[in-house]
Image (tube, rainbow, N blue to C red):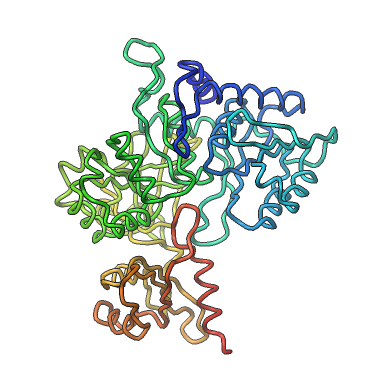
Amino acid sequence: MGLAERIEEVMAIAPESGAVEFEGRWHAWDRFAAGTQWIKKAFAEAQLEAGAPVALVIRNRPAHAGAALAVVASRRMLATVNPHQSAGSVAADLADMRAPAVVLDREDWAKDEVARAARESSRLVIAMGREPDDLEVVYRAARHGDYQPPQPEVAVQMLSSGTTGKPKRINLSYGDLEASVWNVTGGRWARDDKGNLRLNTSPSLIYSPLGHIGGLWFLFYLACEARPFVLLERFNVQQWVAAVKKYRLKNTGLVPAAMRMVLDAGVPKEDLASLVAVGTGTAPLSVQQWREFESRYGIAVLPTYGSTEFAGAVARWSIEDHKQFIATKLGAAGRAIPGNRIRIVDVQTHQPVATGQEGLVEVSSNQLRGGEWVRTTDLGRLDEDGFLYIHGRADGAINRGGFKILPDEIEQALLQHPAVRDAAAFGLPDPRLGQVPVAAVEIHPGQPRPTPAELDAFARRHLVTYKVPVRILVLDELPRTESMKPKLPALRQLALDNARPE
């Protein structure tokens, strides 16, 4: 059974049961089923062929989750658009995408720039309300323009995170996503032990943006598993804790920045007593924070490693790995998930290196068509037990007059300062040395604010001289991507602006 078929089958198992809780209210599976059938009919009437791109300006709301499932169930191509950018940027994305259909919230349709771009770039526009079946056609045209061509094998086209530069669009096939879900579940989502469909009753939780691979993958995973979930529009410590307590969740997730927020909020240990494990990913987790969270709450932290290009995670810690290896493998990103292979190659020759030697990470996966080796820009090593350690990005390495500096080294040094909540390091052009390192730090709320000079002196106690940043920006908050990673392009521009004379 494929992904599209499974989604529709799940919606019919127990129509009146709650599928998604949002802002304290449950939305039943039958409302999602009704929305899916409505969208399929609207696509057919607009003569959208299989694989036709559908631009979805996707927010973390029930109707948006339902629309994402409906587009994939209809065998059209879901093309996600980030709504948390300016109206002009959303409009530019729609114009560039050239999708024959656009689906968006009424909130976005009310923005003149967005509405104009939607009308000019497509022939069908659907606006959504609060319910999964609250849908209406707000624009229809008979024209057949110069649209992006259909790609029937592609389920999702989405942006990579954009952490290190301009995001690019990635095509994920139905086979990619199916393999990614299958690898994690072992295929158990298709049927129960007796071969019958079964609705899970224990809820899960989604707070990651549905426009990011972490949130969208989890949406498809839960749909395939027939599991209801609590949906948060954005991460909020109080709402996250409330969901954990109310539904006695055993497993959930926290990206490193969200984990830091939970720690800083001083959430009582008893509020998280039901949790056995917390998954984390999208950004490196410092050993210091890993230890701090486990020590305070007694909850296993299970990192993952993956990307949009890989349709999700390709390596992770299992609870069994944690029990056996946590004392000796702290800091590792995990081991290859079944269906995936990982190797390390030399940065220059691209030939495989010996166990324990650092190089570029390559991945071969059944989540990638053809299963060929795909080279990443991540620097890492594999140990004798197959654990992957990530040591930064090759394309993020700073070349200071011939000396190579990994941003991660600077970040880890600054994170040892008691006032520093998070840190990001990056290179800026220098006419003499080629590049110089610069850093930005986010300060713990309520902590005395250190001066750049104080942080410089601190960095010099923990780094060799050439690795010390030439400038340290002290910020209340780091600008972040939708996946809550530090937004390096914005930080680079901020550093450049601050360096300019008045």
242 or 404, which is in the foreground? 242
Quadrant where the image shows the C terminus: bottom right
In percent of width and height, residue 419 lies at 30, 72
Q: Residue at x 28, y 35 (%)?
A: 248
Relative vertical location of residue 74 with respect to residue 490 in this rendering, above or below: above
In percent of width and height, residue 21 lies at 45, 33
Residue at far front of view? 24
Relative vertical location of residue 158 with respect to residue 228 in this rendering, above or below: below
Q: How many marks?
A: 0
Q: Residue at x 28, y 77 (%)?
A: 463
Dividing the picture into quarters, in which one does residue 195 lie? top left
Relative vertical location of residue 35 with respect to residue 458 in this rendering, above or below: above
Residue at far bottom of view? 502
Q: Residue at x 32, y 36 (%)?
A: 246
In percent of width and height, residue 81 lies at 61, 47
Q: Residue at x 34, y 72 (%)?
A: 410
In percent of width and height, residue 253 lies at 35, 44
79 or 502, which is in the foreground? 502
232 vs 48, left or right, is left
62 vs 76, left or right, is left
